[in-house]
Every structure is written in C-alpha cells, then in structure tokens.
Amino acid sequence: DVKVTQSSRYLVKRTGEKVFLECVQDMDHENMFWYRQDPGLGLRLIYFSYDVKMKEKGDIPEGYSVSREKKERFSLILESASTNQTSMYLCASTHVGSYSNQPQHFGDGTRLSIL
Amino acid sequence: KQEVTQIPAALSVPEGENLVLNCSFTDSAIYNLQWFRQDPGKGLTSLLLIQSSQREQTSGRLNASLDKSSGRSTLYIAASQPGDSATYLCAVRTAETSGSRLTFGEGTQLTVNP
C-alpha cells in the first residue's frame, strides 16, 4: 500500500516564525504536491515538484517555499508565518509517464494554527 | 482554465437509499478523473479513477461514470450506509506529462441517517 506520511497532524506556531511541514512517500513517485484546504475555498495547490530539486508554483505560492532534496521527501516552508496561513495542509504524490493512470495519494493532513 | 463543479453541496439521505453525486468540468481535454472521500479532519482517500478512454469504473457499492464530451461524471452509491457519511470530491487531471496537476471540485457533504 502506498503511504504518504506528513510529519505532524496538529501544529501550533506563532506569527513570524519559520515553519516547516514535512512529507514523505514510499512509492518512488515523481510528482509531489502541497495543497491547503479551507472551508468554502476547497483544495488549492500551493506548489508541486516533478523531480528532485525541481519545483513549480501552484495557484497560491505567496508566502510559501518548498524543498525537494530527495525524491521521497517534499517540504513546505512558511518563511514568516501569518495568521491567514492557518489552514489544513495536505501533501500528495503520484507517478507520471506510463504509470500516470494511477491515483494521486494523500497524507492525513497537518492542521496548522498560527497565533 | 479548468473548473470543476459538484452538485449538490450537501445531501442527507436515509440508510439504504441509492444516491448519485454529480461532477461537471469545463474543459473536456482531461486525462483522467478521480473520486475521493474525505472524513472530517482527515486526508483524502482515493475511491475510483476513470481514464479518459473509459466510460465507468466500479468498486463494491460504488460506480463512477464519465461522459467526457458533455463534461460530466457521476458517482453512484448503492444501498447507502451510515459509514458512507463523508465529503466526496472529484478531481480531473489534464495531462500525462511531468507537472500534471489535479483540479478539484469543492465536494459534496453526504450524511446517511440510520
């Protein structure tokens, strides 16, 4: 079974802190994604990565950065946390190419609160 | 830009009823369509994936159909149970290449009453 593991289920941080959210997948997937989910706004893509050290902006990249130093790990970084970044953050991964009709797999999410 | 709409936003049914959830998308040039389930406070669980060349997929009491030309998909749940209560999301994938991404609908919140 594919497993996407997010490092924390719940996280509380203070305004201005640098925050790291970690995600690890065990299926050698090329693509990895970070979303945030807010009531009434649905899932919005923040950043994605299609290879080690490669990244592309999603729909709402402002205030975030990402790091992918190893294929299995994709980190989301809040450079200086603000209260409007309080949200549920979801990591996902999937194959590309000839395997790309496989589903996208999600982690359990990190509920982040910025005080 | 691809847009995905799910109707209704919420649905409440008695146990045992058959039901249909709807998903529509604006750009028919999709690669596949995926249905997910999300329980409160949790991540998304993949239920069914329909490739663009397919018309339907089945898993147990779930059946998903795809009509690409009209930009519609339905998720049929037979003999609903209280354990089916969750939010159901559909998402479309637009390309096979690296960087391909999913566009999500906002979901249908389903409540099955005992």
Image (spheres, rainbow, N blue to C red):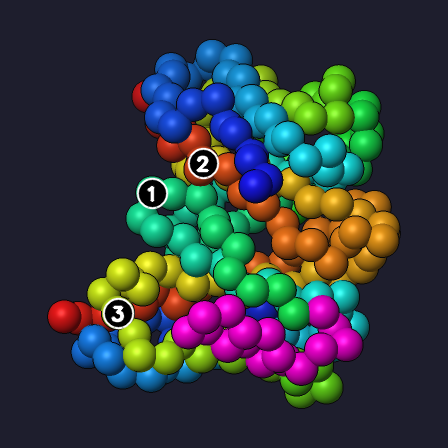
Count of all numbered marks drawn on residues in the image: 3
Residue drawn at x 48%, y 51% as measured from the top left: B45
Report the quarter where the N terminus of chain B lies: bottom right
Q: CA distance from mark 3 to mark 1?
A: 20 Å
Q: Which mark is residue B81?
A: 3
Q: CA distance from mark 2 to mark 1?
A: 8 Å
Query: Tag 3: Cα neighbours inside 10 Å, few (<14), some, or many (≥20)?
Result: some
Kind of residue at badge 2: Gly
Residue linked to disc 1:
B41
Q: Report helix, strand or loop for mark 3.
A: loop
Q: CA distance from mark 3 to mark 2?
A: 26 Å
Furthest residue in direction bottom, as rendered: B70
Q: Which mark is residue A109?
A: 2
Query: Tag 2: Cα neighbours inside 10 Å, few (<14), some, or many (≥20)?
Result: many
Q: Return the x and y of residue A106 as percentages of the image width and height.
A: 54, 43
Q: Depth check: give the residue in front, A83 or A76.
A: A76
In the image, residue B16 above or below residue B44: below
Left or right of residue B60, residue A44 in this image = right
Q: Is residue B2 visible?
A: no
Left or right of residue A34, residue A16 in this image = left
Q: Depth check: give the residue in front, A50 or B59.
A: B59
Report the quarter where the C terminus of chain B lies: bottom left
Residue drawn at x 50%, y 28% as measured from the top left: A6
Furthest residue in direction top, as rendered: A17
Look at the image and give the residue range highlighted in magenta: B51-66
Give the letter of the chain under mark 3: B
